[in-house]
Structures are given as C-alpha cells and as structure tokens.
Amino acid sequence: MSYSSNPLLPKARADAVRLVVEDHLSIAIAARKSGIHRSTLWRWYKRWEALGYTGYVKNIPTTSSRPHSCKHAVSDAVVDRIRFYRNTYGRCAVVVHAYCQREGIIVSLATVRRVLHRLGLLARRRWKRHYRLPVPRPAVTGPGSLVQTDTVHLYDHSTKRRTYLYTVVDIYSRWSYTEHHPVLSQSLAATVVQRGEAAAGFRFGMVQADNGPEYGRQFEEILQKSGSSVRHSRVRRPNDNAYIERFNRTIQQECTGSFCPVGKNLQAKILPYLAYYNKERLHLGIQCKTPQEMLRRS
C-alpha cells in the first residue's frame, strides 16, 4: 500500500491487526477480510509488536515519509558558515549569501534562505493591522449623502511604469469626477475628493473608500477637517464599492483604456468625457436620466 496521510488509517491498521491478535486469524485470511495484501498486514503486525503493545490493539500511527538521507543535502560545514555569518553580522540572507560567495562556498540564495529559516534565524514578518471602528452606512437621500472614491492603476507595458486615476462618484446622482496622476498618495487622494466636491457644487457628507494604502489615516484626517466623514468598505468585499467599481470600468472602456503610455496627457482627454458623462450620457441605474438631471430634481 502506498503512503497515505489519511487520519483514519491508524484505526484501520489496528482493526486489521486485531483480526490476527484477538480473533486468531491467519495473516492471509485477515488480509483478505481487510481488503489489503498479506505483506502489508504483516508489516503492520510487526510494527504493532515493535511498539510494545499488549492486550487490546491500539491505533497504529502513520510513520513519517521524510527520507532518511538526501544526496543533495547541504553539508554541515556550509550550514555552520551560514549560521556564523548570520550571527556575526546580523544581516539578511542576501548579504549572508554574498559572504559565502566571497569565501568560495558554492550555494544558492534560495538555499541560504531555507537554511536560515530551518535554523530559526529569519525574523517572521508580522503585518500590523489597523483596526477601524465600523461606521454605519448612511441612507442615500440626496446628493452628497454617500460618495465613493477609488483608484484605478494604469500600466504601461513598454516602460513598466504605473499611473493612477483617482475617481469619485456620488451614489444619489451618479455625478462623477476623475483626475489622472503619476503617484499614489493619501494627501493627493484627499485633495482629489475636495476638488471633486468643489466641482460638484454640493457638500460630501460621507466618503467611502476601500482599504488601499492611499486611503489610510492621513486621508481620513484631511477629509474630517474639511467636514466630511469617512467610512471604509469591508476587506475583500468589492461589492461594497459597486458604484465606483462600475464607473472605473466605464471610464476605462469609453475613455482612457486599461493602460497609459507615458507622456500622454490623459487629463485633457478626461475633462470632456466627464462633461459628457455628467450632462449627456444616460444611465440605466437612474432610469435613463443624466446626473445633471438628477441634481436638478433634488
């Protein structure tokens, strides 16, 4: 029988051996009743004897499948040198690997990392979680009751560089605002929301964002000073930001595309599209009206 980590297998071994020990059946008959080969049952029986069990047959545990030796194993001398450099200089695996190379030790960086990990000399990276108190979602009764904001990452494959679209959408009227920038910043994200508020002409009571790095504590503090409350969506729940996610898809399909060549002035292209989106484009979510018509109705 091949190796198996089935947790029920120790009990199955004991049941098979019990037919031999307690019921006094032969190995061949007990193996036939258990549905295994007689040589397999014979090994289980010998293991039961080696464990020193007497009387009632206990579960026979599964032995480790770890090999006894490996011809490609790192020698003890190399492990000692890796430990020496780590303890002496306290540097990372890359530096320890460089010291080994200078000494003429042929070992890969991945092996150095594995050895340090096995020796317990690598510091475990612990992610610091910032707990946020849950903020109730307000009822959307008018413009600015709830505004969602997000960031779209545009990637240029030719230059391997990223640029970003900072997007804002009002849930009630679907009025939207977008700016294109080459950097990702909390203060910039808050400034875009403030400029969107000025362009919209109504106050943003509640701003909802995801848990991206550009929407951290500094972003909250800037908006709270300007009179807007901030709430965050649940982690890995993009449906909480469904309106802004849908707008991100729309603006990429109809205006910017999913990549941005460096040097291309996207903002000059975005401004006329926003005018069309807010004043002329009909939206299914608001009964085929425009955001401008929704603002007039309010």
Image (cartoon, helix red, strand yellow):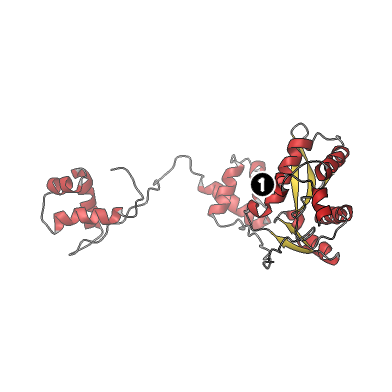
Residue 29 horizontal/vertical position (percent): 12, 47
Q: Is residue 6 left or right of residue 200?
A: left
Q: Residue at x 74, y 33 (%)?
A: 157
15, 188: nearer the viewer: 188
Q: Residue at x 14, y 54 (%)?
A: 20
Residue 143 horizontal/vertical position (percent): 79, 58
Q: Report if residue 293 is visible in the image.
A: yes
23, 156: nearer the viewer: 156
Instruction: From this view, report whether residue 139 is shown above or below residue 84.
Output: below
Q: Quadrant of the C terminus?
A: bottom right
Q: Residue at x 77, y 52 (%)?
A: 173
* Element under disc 1: helix
112, 215: nearer the viewer: 215
Query: Number of numbered discs present?
Result: 1
Q: Amino acid at mark 1?
A: Val
Q: Quadrant of the N terminus?
A: top left
Residue at the bottom extreme of this rendering:
133
Residue receiving disc 1: 94
Q: Which image quarter: residue 190?
A: bottom right
Residue 268 horizontal/vertical position (percent): 88, 38
Residue 107 horizontal/vertical position (percent): 58, 41
Instruction: From this view, report whether residue 218 is shown above or below residue 27.
Output: below
Q: Report if residue 257 is visible in the image.
A: no
Residue at the top extreme of this rendering:
158
